[in-house]
Image (spheres, grey):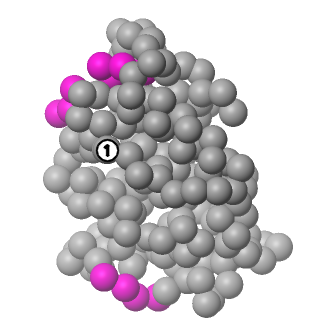
Amino acid sequence: MIIAASPMGLCGVWFTDQRHLPPDTVLARWPHKPAHAVLRLAVAQMTAYFKGRGQFDLPLDLGAGTAFQQSVWQALLRIPSGQTTSYGAISQQINNPKAARAVGAAVGRNPVGIVVPCHRVLGADGSLTGYAGGLSRKGTLLKLENVFTFADGRAPPHLFPSHPGQSNCGAQKALPFPV
């Protein structure tokens, strides 16, 4: 994994083989400073998360997105661990009910995967859809959070509510993440 922090907070968490990575030229410019306080905290919290323990409590820098993307990413932060929602439900929450596809695009561009839980967003029918890190990882993350899924990859209805409610990132990085 690649994680990155700016002076404002954690600004990137990516699987090394996922879609929408920053370009190699950008990654190469980021200094490698694993002693950076936010990175150390992020590594500790992610290690606990992957062991099935803990929540994230990290300062975030989500300033790299558009205003629309930022509103979607803030909505993602409100999805509790162990629960899921849909792209349409998020479009309702951000008061843009016809923007489910645009919400999907913004979710796909989430720069702080796992911590900003885009893996908790499912298709309208509860199916696993669209995860930049791969659908297999999305399923694994949901299982880690004790979200039961059917054999065909859909979430059960009780976990799937039908209706709810330019950054300087790259100042520091840790590469690779030790998981």
The residue that appears at 33% across and 57% down in the rendered structure is: 73
Please state the extent of the stretch shown in magenta in the rendering: 162-173
Q: Tell me if residue 96 comes above or below residue 161 in the rendering.
A: above
Q: Position of residue 116 (x, y in %)?
A: 43, 53
Residue 129 shown left or right of residue 143 in the figure: left
Q: Tell me if residue 155 comes above or below residue 30 in the rendering.
A: below
Q: Position of residue 62 (x, y in %)?
A: 27, 44
Residue 165 is covered by the magenta coloring: yes
Q: Which residue is mark 1?
A: 59
Q: Position of residue 136 (x, y in %)?
A: 72, 52
Q: Is residue 103 visible?
A: no
Q: Tell me if residue 20 comes above or below residue 165 in the rendering.
A: above
Residue 160 shown left or right of residue 36 in the figure: right
The residue that appears at 46% across and 36% down in the rendered structure is: 41
The residue that appears at 60% across and 27% down in the rendered structure is: 177
- The amino acid sitting under disc 1 is Pro
Image quarter where the C terminus lies is top right
Q: Quadrant of residue 142?
A: bottom right
In front: 52, or 77? 52
Image quarter where the N terminus lies is top right
Residue 27 is covered by the magenta coloring: no
Extreme residue in the right direction: 151
Magenta stretch: dominant secondary structure? loop
Mark 1 surroundings within 10 Å by alpha-carbon count, few (fewer than 14), some (14 through 19), many (20 or more)? some
